[in-house]
């Protein structure tokens, strides 16, 4: 059995503002021919908005609304929990971001190369001076994930925002 590794698949640092960032052509195999199992997405970002905006991801440009999502959050010392089903815009929201670069978020997509099971997503986020959140989502589709798009409710991401994708093989 091979030892699982984290391979950097993509790294984007914005040199100009952008309303979305897409990581595409995600590989299914590592350099040794091992199948990637999980996909880890990380971001450190902010938006041009002075108000808090949700950071979300969309898989394979899918807007069919086939998500079930649950999250727990602590917003400015106030606890929140919610479940969303059939989100029509099909974004898995994990964090709230605003006009600084202090929002950190990680999405883990299990078995992203699989074509015979629904995808499970776990997410964790932290806004240093305001909020922490964690949650999960289930994607009611079995196709492999070959692209991921980040968005913050249509507000442009700031210059310097960073988005990375790691594949876990093994």
Image (spheres, grey):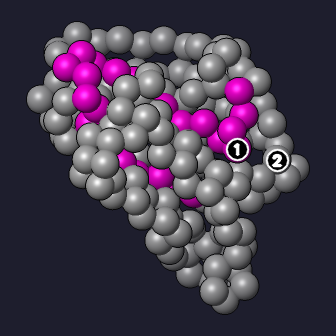
| Residue at the limit of the structure toward the right, as seen here | 116
- Residue 34 rendering spot, x and y as whole percentages: 70, 80
Residue 95 visible to the viewer: no
The residue drawn where x is 42% and y is 64% is: 11
- Whether residue 166 is visible, yes or no, is yes
Mark 1–mark 2 CB contact (< 8 Å): yes
The answer for how far apart the CA atoms under marks 1 and 2 are is 9 Å
Closer to the camera in the image, 17 or 105: 17
- Range of residues picked out in magenta: 39-63
* Residue wearing tag 2: 143
Q: Is residue 134 above or below residue 122?
A: above
In the foreground, 142 or 1: 142
Residue 99: % across, % down: 19, 30
Residue drawn at x 62%, y 57% as measured from the top left? 24
Q: Earlier in the sequence, mark 1 or mark 2?
A: 1
Q: State whether residue 68 is above or below residue 145.
A: above
Residue 99 belongs to magenta span: no
The residue labelled by disc 1 is: 60
Q: Could you classify mark 2 by the number of other residues whose Cα lies within 10 Å: few (under 14), some (14-19), or many (20 or more)?
A: some
Q: Could you say whether the residue bearing mark 2 is in a helix, strand or loop?
A: loop
Left or right of residue 131: residue 68: right
Q: Looking at the image, which residue sits at the far left?
A: 129
Q: Residue furthest bottom?
A: 32
At horizontal 54% and vertical 49% (from top left) the residue drawn is 22
Q: Position of residue 111 (x, y in %)?
A: 70, 55
- State yes or no: residue 62 in magenta: yes
> Which residue lies at the image location 48% right of the left edge and 46% below the top edge?
21
Q: What is the crowding at mark 1: few (fewer than 14 residues within 10 Å), some, or many (at least 20)? A: some
């Amino acid at each position: 059995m091979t030892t699982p590794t984290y391979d950097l698949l993509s790294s984007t640092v914005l040199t100009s503002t952008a309303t979305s960032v897409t990581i595409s052509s995600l590989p299914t195999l590592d350099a040794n021919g091992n199948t990637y199992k999980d996909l880890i997405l990380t971001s450190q970002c902010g938006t041009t908005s002075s108000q808090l905006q949700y950071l979300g991801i969309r898989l394979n440009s899918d807007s069919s609304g086939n998500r079930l999502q649950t999250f727990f959050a602590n917003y400015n010392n106030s606890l929140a929990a919610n479940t969303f089903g059939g989100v029509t815009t099909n974004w898995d929201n994990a964090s709230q971001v605003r006009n600084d670069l202090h929002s950190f978020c990680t999405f883990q997509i299990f078995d992203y190369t699989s074509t015979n099971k629904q995808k499970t997503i776990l997410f964790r986020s932290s806004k240093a001076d305001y909020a922490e959140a964690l949650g999960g989502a289930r994607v009611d589709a079995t196709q492999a994930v070959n692209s991921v798009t980040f968005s913050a409710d249509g507000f442009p991401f700031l210059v310097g925002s960073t988005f990375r994708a790691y594949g876990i093989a093994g």
